[in-house]
Image: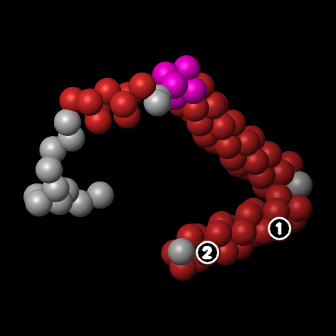
Amino acid sequence: MAHDPYKRPMTLAESEELLNGRNPDADTFGFWYGLGKGLLKVSIWVAVIAAVSYLCVAVPVLGWALAGGVLVYAIVEISKAGKK
């Protein structure tokens, strides 16, 4: 967000009006919800990596096939993210 040097500063009344519209409980809930969601995603990926690693040792053919599938999935997702 670029700063506009020609825009006048916000008045105290405008600032108070803006702050009165905020809900600090919703902000706090949004932070913890986002943090929990991110930690859940990370723990799911850790579980997937652990399962693939175990399969690579226990059942090499199945494990390496699954590892290849995860690699292809990751490449596709990265290319999608690059096109946004």
Q: Residue furthest top?
A: 25
The kind of secondary structure element at disc 2 is: helix
Give the residue displayed 78% in from the left and 68% down from the top.
69
Disc tally is 2
Tell whether 32 sits left or right of 70: left
The residue that disc 2 covers is: 80
Give the residue displayed 61% in from the left and 75% down from the top.
80
What secondary structure predominates along the stretch shown in magenta?
A: helix
Mark 2: amino acid: Lys
Q: Which residues are magenta?
A: 23-27
Tell whether 68 sits left or right of 30: right
The kind of secondary structure element at disc 1 is: helix
| Between 9 and 46, the one nearer to me in the picture | 9
Give the residue displayed 42% in from the left and 25% down from the top.
20
Residue 43 visible, this orientation = no
| Between 5 and 1, the one nearer to me in the picture | 5
